[in-house]
Amino acid sequence: MSNGLLTEEEVKTYLQVDETEIGRLRRRGKLTSYRVGGTFVRYRKDEVTALKSGRKFRMPDQFDRNWADMIRDFSTFYGAYILLAFAVAFLVFYFVHT
């Protein structure tokens, strides 16, 4: 097996399953596929070995996140929508009471 990414043939050989079972694993979220070059499907070697051994695979960037990081990401992504919602609520409150 190569380092990093595996082809579908390598995954079939390593897990000893057929193509339909790989499709089922992808649909159930147990196996993540990546497109390389637009048409070639590859799988992470770490994820495949974790699947075979029965462990839960976690992406490396998920280990470093804490609640402050999640709040910062949420406010960065949804900040404009939150401010707009407060502005609309303020305007509705202002025009209803005048």
Image (cartoon, rainbow, N blue to C red):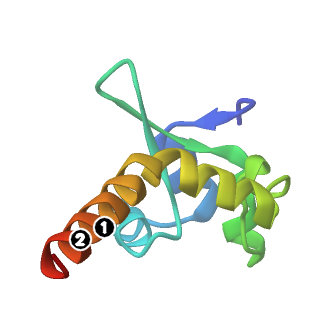
The residue positioned 67% from the left and 61% from the top of the image is 71
Residue pictured at 67% horizontal, 52% vertical: 72
Q: Which residue is drawn at 15% across and 76% down?
A: 98
Tell me the CA gap for discs 1 and 2.
Answer: 6 Å
- At x 19%, y 72%, the residue is 92
Name the quadrant containing residue 90. bottom left
For residue 46, side relative to residue 33 (left or right): right
Circle 2 sits in a helix, a strand or a loop, which is it? Answer: helix
- Which residue occupies the foreground of this view, 3 or 66? 66
User: Where, by quadrant of the figure, is residue 36 drawn?
Assistant: top left
Q: Nearer the viewer, mark 1 or mark 2?
A: 2
Q: Where is residue 73 in the image (x, y as percent from the top left)?
A: 61, 50
Image quadrant in which the N terminus is located = top right
Q: Label 1 is placed on what type of residue?
A: Phe
Report the amino acid beneath label 2: Tyr
Residue 50: horizontal and vertical position, in percent? 75, 65
Image: 69 above or below 97: above
Label 1: which residue?
Answer: 90
Q: How many labels does the image show?
A: 2
Q: Do the residues labelled 1 and 2 touch (CB within 8 Å)?
A: yes
Would you say 89 lies left or right of 2 here?
Answer: left
Q: Which mark is residue 94?
A: 2
Q: Is mark 1 on a helix, strand or loop?
A: helix
Who is closer to the viewer here, 59 or 19? 59
Q: Residues within 10 Å of mark 1 (few under 14, many from 20)?
A: few
